Amino acid sequence: MNLESDAEQDQRPAAHHRRRSRWSGVRPYLKGTALALAVVLVSGVSLGGIYVWQLGAKVGDNALDISNGTEVPDADQPGMDAFTGGFSVLAVGADNATGQSEAYGDRGRALNDVNILFHVSADHQSAVVMSLPRDLVIPQPSCVDPETGEEFDEVYAEPLNDAFGRGGLGCVKATIEELTGLSIPYAALFTFEGTVAMSDAVGGVPICLDSAIYDPWSGLDLPAGVTNVSGQQALAYLRSRKGVGSGSDLSRITSQQAYMSSLMRVMKSSETLTDVSKVLGLANAAAEHVSLSQSLASITTMASMALTLKDLDLDKLVFVQYPVEEDPDNSNKVVPSPDLAERLIAKILADEPFVLDEASLGEDVVLDPAAPVAPPAPDDAGGAEDSAAPIETEVPVGTESPATPEVLDGLRGQTASQQTCSVAN
C-alpha cells in the first residue's frame, strides 16, 4: 500500500470544498496522541491538586462548539465521583488549529491528520483507543462551520482529514459518529506545543528503537534501544514517517500507539502520581494547549472521568488501528475493511472486551526484548509453576475472565502493558 507522501498530499486539490481555509500551520502528526488520554487523567491525577484547574477559566474561554448545527441538550454535570456508565472522547490534531505556531510551516489549509477515539466501557473494566487513518476515504455528512455559519453538503467519498476544513471539530465528530454508530459527546483539539509540553511535564517518555534512526524530514536522530525523549525529540519521533516501518502513515500510527502506551505507563507510575510538580505541569500543559468541547470543559467532568480511569488495568487498555484496506480507486488512500471493521465496532458498541491475536503488532513494531516479563501464574494447586519451565517473553494481550474475551484476528495494535520498539525503515 503506497500512501501518498506529505508533499504529494499538500499539492492535492481540495475536492468538494466550497472554500479553501486561510488558516496557516502544519501537519500535527501527533497533536493529540501525547495528550489524548491525559486530558481525562490530568485533573484527577491528584485530587489534592485539583485547584490547578482554576486555569479552567482559560479552558472554558477556548471551549469549542461541536454541535455541527444541531440542537444539543445540556449535559448533566457529574459530581466528583467516578463517571457513571461508559463514555467516548474524540481527540483530534488538526493543521492550523488556533494557537499553532507558524514555526512548523504552512500547508495552506486545515486538515485533521490525527483522529483518536477513546471509549471506556460501561463497567469501567476495559477501554479501547482507536486511531483512524487520515487517508481513510468515507462518506461525510453535511456540516456547519460554527464560526461562520457556512454550510457544506454531504460528500460520499472524501478522505477523513478533509472533515476539519468542512466544519471544524464538530464535523470530524459527526463524520466518525456516522462511520461507527457511536455517540461521541466529548472532544478535544490539540497542538504541537501541547505534545512537547506534555512530554516535558512528565519528565520524558521512554521510547524504543530496534536500531538507530536518522530521519532528516522529521529531525529524528536516536540510537538503538530505549531513550527517554522529551520536547522536540518526542515530537520528532511522533512525526517521523520515513524513518519507521514501511514509511506509510499507518506505520506512523503504530509509533504513535507505542508512544501513547509508554505515556500511560508513565502516567500510572507512582513517580508521576505523587510528584506535585509533575501534576502541576500536566495541568498547565493541558490548560495552555488543549481546546475542549463545551461538554468537556468542566472541572468536575474531567475529574469524574479521571477517577473512572485511574484503576484501569493497563492490559485492558487496547490501542487499535481502525481496519482498512487499499482504496481500489487510489493506491495512496485506504477504505474500511468491512468485515473486520464491523466486528471491531460491534464489540465497542456492546462494551465487550476483546483480545488481539499474536500477529497484532505487525511489522512496524516488535516487543522490547529488554522489557520485564510477566511473572508465572500459580498452578491449580496454588503453587508456582516449575521454575525450569520457559517464561513467555510477550506480555499477554487481554486477560482471562469467566467469559474469555473473543480474539479479533487481523487487528493491528497493542495493549498499554506491552513495551514495544519501533522498527527502523
Image: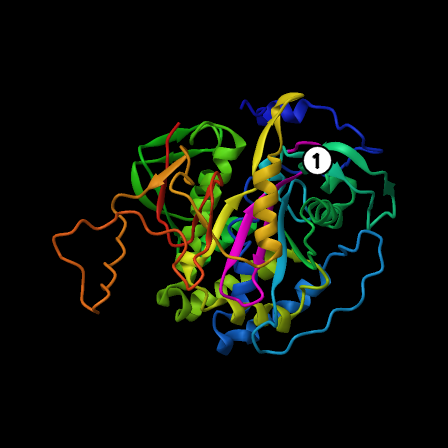
| Residue sitting nearer the eye, 206 or 137 | 137
Quadrant location of the C terminus in the rendered image? top left
Q: Which residues are magenta?
A: 106-131
Could you tell me which residue is drawn at 53 percent across and 66 percent down?
Answer: 124
Label 1: few (<14), some (14–19) or many (≥20) C-alpha neighbours in 10 Å:
some
Q: Is residue 126 magenta?
A: yes
Q: Place residue 192 in its image quadrant.
A: top right
Left or right relative to 167: residue 309:
left
Could you tell me which residue is drawn at 55 percent across and 52 percent down?
Answer: 194
Q: Residue 161 appears at what percent x and percent y?
A: 67, 37
Q: Residue 62 appears at what percent x and percent y?
A: 71, 59
Q: Residue 193 appears at what percent x and percent y?
A: 56, 49
Is disc 1 placed on a helix, strand or loop? strand
Could you tell me which residue is drawn at 53 percent across and 32 percent down?
Answer: 249
Could you tell me which residue is drawn at 71 percent across and 64 percent down?
Answer: 295
Residue labelled with disc 1: 138
Q: Amino acid at mark 1?
A: Ile
Query: Is residue 313 in sight in this rendering?
Result: yes
